[in-house]
Image (spheres, coloured by chain):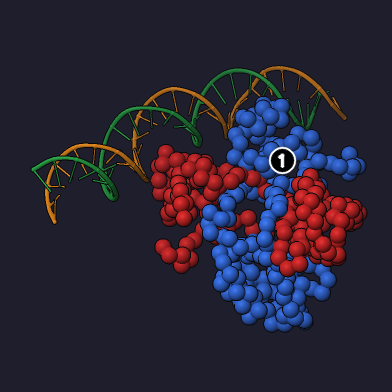
Chain colours: A blue, B red, C green, D orange
DNA sequence: CATAACTTGGTCTTTTTCGCCAAAATAAAG
DNA sequence: CTTTATTTTGGCGAAAAAGACCAAGTTATG
């Protein structure tokens, strides 16, 4: 393949930077540099490069859902009986517009969608489900997983190499 | 109820700040202040208060999974046939230790777990599944949703009031 | 020798602290 | 019940401290 690999391989320091920034996104370059054992200039250059290369795609404050009255976390599985090309497109657009739908994935099996939504209450849940069924033409069935307890919710990806030809 | 409400209600400016910080977590206080129409001092005070009150729980750089060779996103549903108290505890601990498991939820229905994991490849997936089945004593069945396409992945929660007795 | 990566030092910007001000709310006095 | 203090709340601007950023020169490394 003609893959123009502009993006240098990530070394130990880069991965260290990624680990730290994933957990402390507002850390100063000075302290970050200290922690990874560099002076600020090359450290900043590395961060800027990671951003340019698309390794770091953004920085985000995490907000406690309960503080915004999102008391309901729900996963919804939607199975389509037939799939016309524009049904998918139409659905994707609808999903994009709804800010309460945090994730939407097209999963294998029988061409299902898996949605993750944070909602205020049950009435909003019913509203959402209604809207889904309206938007999609050929819904075979839908199954909901209402979350009783969030055991783990991690934003950090592991950065270690773990036996990958290094 | 004797709810000591230390946390003041969020006003328009607070919500504005939250929206911006959710999308630009490394923005400077000076620019943030500009955008919300305040001078830096009160703006910073508000942010600090939002952090103290637990509205903002952290700041995180988002890393492109593909850049770290995570090519596989999978949701795993695990149903337990019987649930001894320490089985849950044991499972939770195991989940905590595995960095590839990004989310783990206890969902309603027949006391199932729903996991979200980012993995390098299929062999790691098999490895994970094996470990799950070993860790949990009474697994009735498990179903996997392998993600073919990530239609939407949003980190931002809506901050608008949307008809909530304001 | 040349390139890549780091260091140092200086300048400009941002952060953070501090004292002050205005408006609103609360309390006291007439 | 109205008027006048007093506290509380939220905001402003200036100045010191810290950090970001830039332009050299310096050290590794192939």
Q: Where, by quadrant of the figure, is residue C2 drawn?
A: top right
A43 or B162, which is in the foreground? Answer: B162
Q: Is residue A29 left or right of residue B37?
A: right
Position of the N terminus of chain A, as image quadrant, is: bottom right
Q: Mark 1, residues whose alpha carbon is within 10 Å: few (<14), some, or many (≥20)?
A: many
Residue B125, quarter of picture: bottom right
Say above or below: C30 vs B9.
above
Number of numbered discs present? Answer: 1
Which chain letter goes with mark 1? A
Q: Is residue A33 left or right of residue A71?
A: right
Instruction: Locate the C terminus of chain A by quadrant.
Output: top right
Residue at x 44%, y 53% (from the top left corner): B9
Q: Is residue B7 above or below residue D6?
A: below
- Picture coordinates of residue A123, whole percent (x, y): 56, 72
Could you tell me if residue B130 is visible in this image?
Answer: yes
Q: Residue at x 46, y 40 (%)?
A: B44
Residue A1 visible in the snapshot:
no
Q: Is residue A37 above or below residue D9?
A: above
Q: Is residue B15 above or below residue B43?
A: below
Give the left or right position of residue A37, taking residue D30 as reference. left
Residue in the picture at 51% in, 42% down = B52
Nearer to me, A85 or B82:
B82
Task: Tell me which residue sits at (47%, 62%) in the image.
Answer: B161
In this view of the protein, which residue sits in the foreground, C6 or B9?
Answer: B9
Q: Position of residue A137 (x, y in %)?
A: 69, 82
| Residue B18 percent coordinates (x, y) | 52, 51
User: The residue tagged with tag 1: helix, strand or loop?
Assistant: helix
Q: Is residue A55 left or right of residue A63?
A: right
Name which quarter of the figure residue A6 lies in.
top right
Identify the residue position indicated by label 1 in the image: A18
Give percent across and percent down for residue B41: 42, 38
């Amino acid at each position: 393949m003609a893959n123009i690999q502009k993006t240098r391989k990530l070394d130990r320091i880069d991965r260290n930077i990624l680990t730290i920034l994933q957990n402390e996104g507002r850390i100063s370059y000075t302290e970050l540099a200290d922690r990874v054992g560099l002076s600020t200039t090359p450290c900043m250059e590395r961060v800027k490069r990671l951003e340019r290369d698309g390794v770091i795609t953004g920085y985000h404050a995490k907000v406690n859902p309960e503080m915004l009255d999102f008391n309901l976390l729900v996963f919804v599985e939607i199975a389509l009986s037939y799939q016309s090309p524009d049904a998918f497109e139409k659905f994707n657009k609808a999903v994009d517009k709804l800010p309460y739908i945090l994730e939407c994935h097209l999963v294998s099996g029988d061409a299902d969608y898996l949605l993750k939504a944070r909602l205020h209450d049950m009435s909003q849940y019913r509203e959402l489900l209604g809207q889904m069924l309206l938007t999609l033409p050929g819904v075979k069935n839908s199954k909901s997983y209402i979350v009783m307890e969030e055991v783990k919710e991690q934003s950090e990806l592991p950065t270690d190499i773990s036996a990958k030809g290094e």
